[in-house]
Amino acid sequence: MGDPISALSLGANVIQVVEVSFRLVSSSRAIYQSVDGSLAENLDTEILATDLQDCNAILSQSLAKFKSKNAGSTANWNPADSVTTLVPEPAEPSTWDAQEAEALQNLCEDCNRIATVLIQKLKHLKVDPNVRWRELKSLKQALKTVWSKEELDATANRLNLYRTQLNTRILVSLR
């Protein structure tokens, strides 16, 4: 009989191969069966990233109006003006100067840049529903998804940090 530690190590490796194979096959099947050729979690992430880009666009437009309207003046931007449909009007809304508005604009741009990167990565993991050999393409994309999971999670976490900072900056402005 061989070394018990070697046998345990071999057993652990076999279990790991079976686990990875199971995840690969289940991901491949989910991609193949989906209408849009993507995993549900990837589709959800893409939808949320796109929605965040849309919200940033609205905020950026409000900031651009502030900048153009008050170029060269000492006027302040009232963050409550751009979120009146989302939040009830505060009793005494605070105002921002141009420097604070510029910082928020930079956050919006960085957030959009990261969201665009994430969306592009997710689109590369989709399978066209009308492609020939869809079964094989689904397996290939599932393999790419498993390999790039850490990278996708890291990008999504960075995007979440920017979203949190945007929320914090806007909430502080409404004090």
Image (cartoon, rainbow, N blue to C red):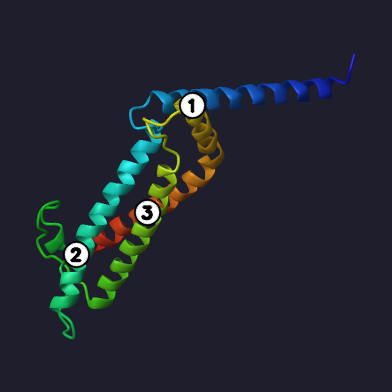
Mark yes or no: residue 175 visible: no
Q: Residue at (36%, 41%) from the top-left corner?
A: 45
Q: Residue at (25%, 60%) from the top-left corner?
A: 170
Q: CA distance from mark 2 to mark 3?
A: 18 Å
Badge 1 density bin: few <14, some 14–19, many ≥20, Cα 10 Å = many
Give the residue furthest to the bottom.
72
Dot 2 falls on a residue whose secondary structure is helix
The residue wearing badge 3 is 116
- Horizontal side, residue 69 vs residue 144: left or right: left
The residue wearing badge 2 is 61
Q: Check whether the beta carbons of the residues at disc 2 and disc 3 lie within 8 A of each other.
A: no
Q: Check whether the beta carbons of the residues at disc 3 and disc 1 lie within 8 A of each other.
A: no
Q: Nearer the viewer, mark 1 or mark 2?
A: 1
Per the rendering, the mark at residue 28 is 1
Question: What amino acid type is highlighted by mark number 3?
Answer: Thr
Q: Quadrant of the N terminus?
A: top right
Q: As displayed, is residue 23 above or below residue 79? A: above
Q: Residue at (28%, 76%) from the top-left corner?
A: 99
